[in-house]
């Protein structure tokens, strides 16, 4: 894989260099004749992400002679740990691409600089959720890497047809559809309930759309009880496998869907390449609808995913300004469209996202449409989000595994969340 | 004691050759008899120096740092500074107040004791089997250590595959053989998950126990076994009254090493269950990792780690070493 | 049945028992090898296949291209860790067993503590120390870190071994005028050969299989051991378990060769050390 990527990377670099020789002259002048290396860390590992980033970097380097951007891949499960360790050693890379729930934590280390203080920063045109992720004390610390992403209900068209059900839009429909779609060969839906953040993330649209507080402070009252009872019912009905307690969103749950072992899943657009690779195409083999709501008329509030660029204090102001130029260059509409496509994300700006649906295809429509109501997970919770999220996924696991009832699992969670919020 | 006798009997051979070898060395330093003791102390210290330097650098610094952390009120905001506000015993208090931490301590006890017991029983049985003569025993013995070649993260995932409710190899076999009538929730049932993790860890540790115990059994003198046979001892009696006492020192060392490997098991659980479902497989190590690096409470994570160290020291088979006198430098030291 | 027949039957029964045990012991390894020929989708499809279901060489194609250099890196790290463990542990174990030193009790007990400290605890602080000592992202740094698995273990095992060497040996050498170093170098070390090899193999496997330190201490793409290489395939948006299996299977080869070569020393070295009176 990497072999081909390298080859492609070189080809792209050549093309980029050629194009920038014409376009990028003005920028060259800005930072001429300095030899500087920017270090960058991220966890991107799909072929599209790797090559998308590489070709952008090649463009950037071509437009900034003397500047090299050195990329360091860190496995997803370990990037947070690694960055904190580096922060402890005052040794962060210049550029860091962090998962958005971790942005607040990075800000609080005091080792990253506010971008709103840098020349050329603007929040204009972004979806509120996309730009607010990096907001702390009135300063903005981050910009999206390649836009953002979220989740929706993906269904197997043939299976729904065979069971004579239409795509569910309400919880009642979801329950009956999942039941009807369950056969000895497959389950109605593949849930994700492993002991990790993706479980909370999967549950958030159910809870938040149903009036749940973004801080989870009211998790034990009806919005939470109803949302968790829904999942519990899917499992007790036998419409969802109990094995979901050890399933990640990707690839565990998504593989169930691809292998035809589940008729539906709640998942994101990053699955498109793998789906296509397995001969599943939008409109033919699979369809997408928003995550169902309890009663018609409720807005679907999805959590917003994706990664954000941050700039560390390491290196002087020149390095910081250059790093910012690197980030800024990605925010032009043309680059946004290109990168969103390569990454399997949605553009972070509203107008660009509208163009994107027309260009990239109708499978993006649901995701783009719901972004306006999306919520950045850390907004309002900041560094407390990881703690709260852990309490939430533990409660979900307790209820679904049967070690506690839905109500008592949520009551335990609520009292823990109260004390986290009070601390 | 028999071992000692046997070893003593073999001593003259290497001793003679050694003497010959030493005879070729120059007789320097012979005149300084008086300072021999001091010289030997100095030599001992010089032999120790690299290790002491290494231990100070690689262990003492991190441990001290960790103890400091455990008394500090830490957060991501304090991470870049060398110290954080003093917190007294607050981290320790919250660790003991937290039901998950307490459960993790209990799980660690069960997990460690169960692992050691299972590894010993199975390892010893296999070791005994390998002492018998049968076709293919050499091959079988060498294949036992193959599992060590797998990285732990892969081991965790493989067990996750094998123990899946549907389509897991374990359930498939059990149901084909008729030992189970419906799939067992190995990893999804909170009451069962810890046992499943335990089974995986026993699997991981059995080769080590087998290997050590097997070699110890090899060292049991044939005459001893024959004498016991003459006295009309049955196989069980021979094992209990003759063989086990002889290899007891090895059993102790094996337990000690098995213990230190087991109390810090981490990757396996992360790969297998991530501590779930609902914290049912949370061990001290995984929970402290979680406190430090998932919710970024480094002080509490450090405190829980120190609890592990103290508990491990109290419960470790350390006393075995102490009571056996091998900690005393005198037992084998030169004059 | 005659007595001979009976004993033959008994032997084959033992073979059968050993076979059963081996099936259990080796099954996960077998599952990795089968898995290395499957796609991630098949692996997670919820059906277990005893033989490759839709066999593909894609995983190996991916992995051999990308990970060959990492295997070499891991070999260097493994050998370096073994060398470090020996240089530090052999003399120390000798001193702790054959010299009457005041610190022996303290040192031996602290070695036990050292072995219990989880690596993740060491890793964070080591990074800070290494950063200050300019050891981040270097082979020496990684080897020093990986030594934390091997050194305490090596000292304890070797020390137990040295107890089994009769004191008369050293005494005789001294009478003949050998210096302390000569006694150690020419008499003790050669006699301890099998224990030394055992410890070296364990240290090698530790350096070879380490992930946590490779992750914390390394900081660039210049040094990438195979364990980090395996993690390339574990991501948030795509996890290629087929490639993970293939890397694991691929990485088993050199370590397996090493283990086979040293196999006969491992057991003898460990126990010779453990049996002491």
Image (spheres, coloured by chain):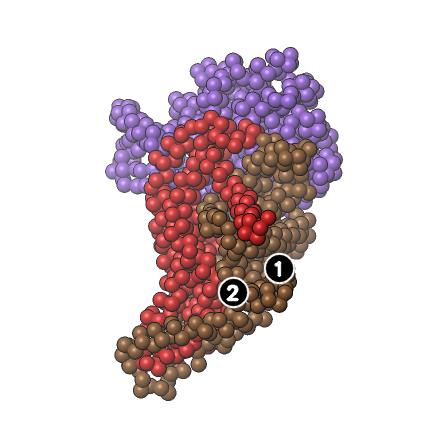
Chain colours: A purple, B brown, C red
| Residue A266 in view here | yes
Report the residue at 60% width, 12% height from top: A161
Residue B50 image position (x, y, % from top left): 39, 66
**In the figure, is residue A388 to the left or right of B135?**
right
Q: Mark 2 lies on which chain?
A: B
Residue found at the very far front of the displayed protein: C2
Residue A177 image position (x, y, % from top left): 66, 18
What label sits on residue A286 in the rendered view?
A: none
Dot 1, how many residues are within 10 Å of its Cα: few (below 14), some (14-19), or many (20+)?
A: few
On the image, numbered disc 2 is attached to which residue? Answer: B222
Residue B107 image position (x, y, % from top left): 64, 50
Q: Quadrant of the N terminus of chain B?
A: bottom right
Residue A347 image position (x, y, % from top left): 46, 24
Answer yes or no: are tags 2 and 1 on the same subunit. yes
**In the figure, is residue A402 to the left or right of A41?**
right
Q: Which chain carries label 1?
A: B
- The alpha-carbon separation of the residues under discs 2 and 1 comes to 15 Å
Q: Quadrant of the C terminus of chain B?
A: bottom left
Q: Which of C141 and A57 is in front in this view?
A: C141
The secondary element bearing badge 1 is classed as helix
Report the residue at 63% width, 52% height from top: B114
On the image, numbered disc 1 is attached to which residue? Answer: B235
**Placement of C180 over or under B285, stated as above or below:** below
Report the residue at 40% width, 40% height from top: C250
In the picture, residue C187 is in which quadrant? bottom left
**Placement of C131 over or under B174, stated as above or below:** below
Report the residue at 53% width, 67% height from top: B223
């Amino acid at each position: 894989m990497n072999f081909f990527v390298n080859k492609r990377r070189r080809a792209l670099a050549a093309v980029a260099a050629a194009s920038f020789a014409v376009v990028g002259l003005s920028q060259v002048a800005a930072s001429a004749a300095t030899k500087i290396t920017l270090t960058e860390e991220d966890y991107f590992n799909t072929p599209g992400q790797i090559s998308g980033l590489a070709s952008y970097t090649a463009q950037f380097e071509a437009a900034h002679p003397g500047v090299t951007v050195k990329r360091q891949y860190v496995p997803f499960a370990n990037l947070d740990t690694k960055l904190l360790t580096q922060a402890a050693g005052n040794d962060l890379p210049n550029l860091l691409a962090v998962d958005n729930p971790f942005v607040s934590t990075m800000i609080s280390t005091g080792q990253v600089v506010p971008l709103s203080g840098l020349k050329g920063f603007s929040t204009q045109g972004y979806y509120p959720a996309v730009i607010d992720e990096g907001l702390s004390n009135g300063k903005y610390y981050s910009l999206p890497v390649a836009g953002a992403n979220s989740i929706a209900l993906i269904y197997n068209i043939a299976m729904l047809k065979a069971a004579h059900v239409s795509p569910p839009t309400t919880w009642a429909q979801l329950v009956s559809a999942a039941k009807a779609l369950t056969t000895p060969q497959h389950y109605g839906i593949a849930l994700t309930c492993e002991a990790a953040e993706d479980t909370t993330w999967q549950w958030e649209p159910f809870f938040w759309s149903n009036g749940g507080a973004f801080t989870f402070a009211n998790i034990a009252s009806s919005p939470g009880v109803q949302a968790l009872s829904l999942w519990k019912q899917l499992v007790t009905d036998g419409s969802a496998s109990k094995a979901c307690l050890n399933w990640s969103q990707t690839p565990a749950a998504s593989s169930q869907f691809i292998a035809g072992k589940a008729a539906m899943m709640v998942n994101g657009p990053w699955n498109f390449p793998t789906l296509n690779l397995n001969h599943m195409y939008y409109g033919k083999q699979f369809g997408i609808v928003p995550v169902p709501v309890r009663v018609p008329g409720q807005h679907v509030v999805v959590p917003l995913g994706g990664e954000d660029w941050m700039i560390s204090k390491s290196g002087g102001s020149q390095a910081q300004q250059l790093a910012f130029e690197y980030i800024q260059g990605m925010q032009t509409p043309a680059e946004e469209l290109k990168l969103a496509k390569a990454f399997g994300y949605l553009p972070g700006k509203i107008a660009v996202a509208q163009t994107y649906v027309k260009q990239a295809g109708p499978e993006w429509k649901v995701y783009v449409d719901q972004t306006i109501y999306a919520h950045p997970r850390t907004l309002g919770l900041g560094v407390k989000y990881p703690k709260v999220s852990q309490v939430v996924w533990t409660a979900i696991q307790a209820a679904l595994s049967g070690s506690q009832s839905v109500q008592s699992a949520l009551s335990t969670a609520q009292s823990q969340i109260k004390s986290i919020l009070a601390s | 004691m028999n071992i000692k006798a046997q070893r003593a009997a073999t001593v003259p051979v290497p001793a003679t050759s050694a003497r010959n070898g030493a005879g070729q060395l120059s007789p320097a330093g012979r005149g300084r008899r008086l300072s021999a003791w001091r010289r030997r102390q100095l030599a001992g210290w010089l032999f120790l120096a690299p290790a002491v330097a290494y231990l100070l650098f690689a262990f003492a610094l991190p441990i001290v740092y960790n103890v400091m952390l455990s008394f500090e009120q830490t957060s991501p905001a304090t991470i870049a500074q060398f110290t954080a506000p003093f917190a007294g015993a607050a981290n320790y208090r919250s660790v003991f107040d937290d039901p998950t931490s307490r459960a993790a301590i209990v799980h660690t006890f069960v997990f460690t004791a169960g692992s050691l017991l299972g590894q010993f029983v199975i390892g010893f049985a296999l070791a005994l089997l390998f002492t018998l003569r049968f076709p293919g025993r050499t091959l079988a013995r060498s294949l036992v250590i193959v599992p060590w070649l797998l990285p732990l993260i892969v081991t965790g995932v493989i067990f996750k595959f094998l123990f899946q409710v549907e389509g897991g190899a374990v359930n498939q076999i059990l149901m084909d053989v008729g030992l189970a009538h419906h799939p067992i929730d190995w990893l999804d049932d909170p009451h069962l998950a810890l046992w499943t993790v335990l089974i995986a860890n026993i699997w991981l540790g059995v080769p080590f126990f087998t290997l050590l115990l097997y070699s110890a059994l090899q060292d049991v003198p044939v005459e001893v076994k024959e004498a016991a046979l003459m006295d009309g001892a049955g196989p069980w009696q021979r094992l209990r009254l003759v063989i086990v006492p002889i290899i007891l020192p090895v059993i102790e060392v094996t337990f000690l090493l098995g213990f230190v490997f087991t109390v810090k098991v981490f990757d396996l659980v992360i790969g297998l269950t991530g501590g779930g479902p609902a914290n049912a497989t949370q061990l001290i190590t995984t929970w402290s990792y979680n406190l430090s690096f998932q919710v970024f409470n480094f002080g509490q994570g450090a405190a829980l780690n120190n609890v592990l160290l103290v508990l491990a020291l109290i419960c470790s088979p350390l006393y075995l070493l102490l009571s056996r006198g091998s900690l005393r430098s005198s037992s084998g030291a030169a004059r | 049945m005659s007595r001979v027949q009976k004993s033959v039957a008994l032997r084959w029964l033992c073979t059968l028992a050993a076979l059963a045990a081996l099936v259990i012991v080796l099954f996960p390894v077998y599952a990795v090898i089968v898995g290395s020929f499957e796609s991630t989708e098949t692996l997670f499809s919820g059906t277990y296949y005893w033989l490759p279901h839709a066999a593909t060489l894609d995983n190996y194609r991916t992995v051999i291209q990308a990970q060959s250099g990492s295997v070499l890196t891991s070999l260097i790290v493994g050998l370096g860790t073994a060398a470090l463990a020996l240089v530090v542990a052999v003399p120390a174990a000798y001193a702790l067993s054959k010299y009457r030193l005041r610190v022996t009790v303290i040192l031996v007990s602290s070695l036990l503590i050292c072995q219990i400290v989880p690596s993740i605890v060491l890793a964070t602080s080591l990074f800070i120390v290494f950063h200050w000592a300019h050891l981040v992202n270097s082979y020496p740094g990684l080897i020093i870190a990986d030594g934390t698995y091997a050194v305490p273990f090596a000292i304890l095992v070797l020390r137990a071994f040295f107890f089994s060497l009769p004191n008369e040996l050293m005494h005789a050498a001294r009478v003949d005028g050998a210096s302390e170093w000569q006694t150690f170098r020419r008499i003790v070390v050669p006699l301890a050969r099998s224990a030394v090899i055992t410890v070296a193999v364990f240290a090698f496997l530790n350096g070879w299989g380490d992930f946590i330190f490779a992750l914390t201490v390394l900081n660039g793409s210049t040094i990438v051991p195979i364990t980090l290489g395996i993690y390339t395939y574990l991501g948030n948006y795509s996890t290629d378990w087929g490639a993970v299996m293939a890397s694991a299977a691929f990485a088993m080869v050199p370590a397996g060769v090493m283990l086979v070569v040293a196999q006969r020393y491992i057991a003898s070295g460990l126990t010779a050390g453990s049996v002491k009176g």
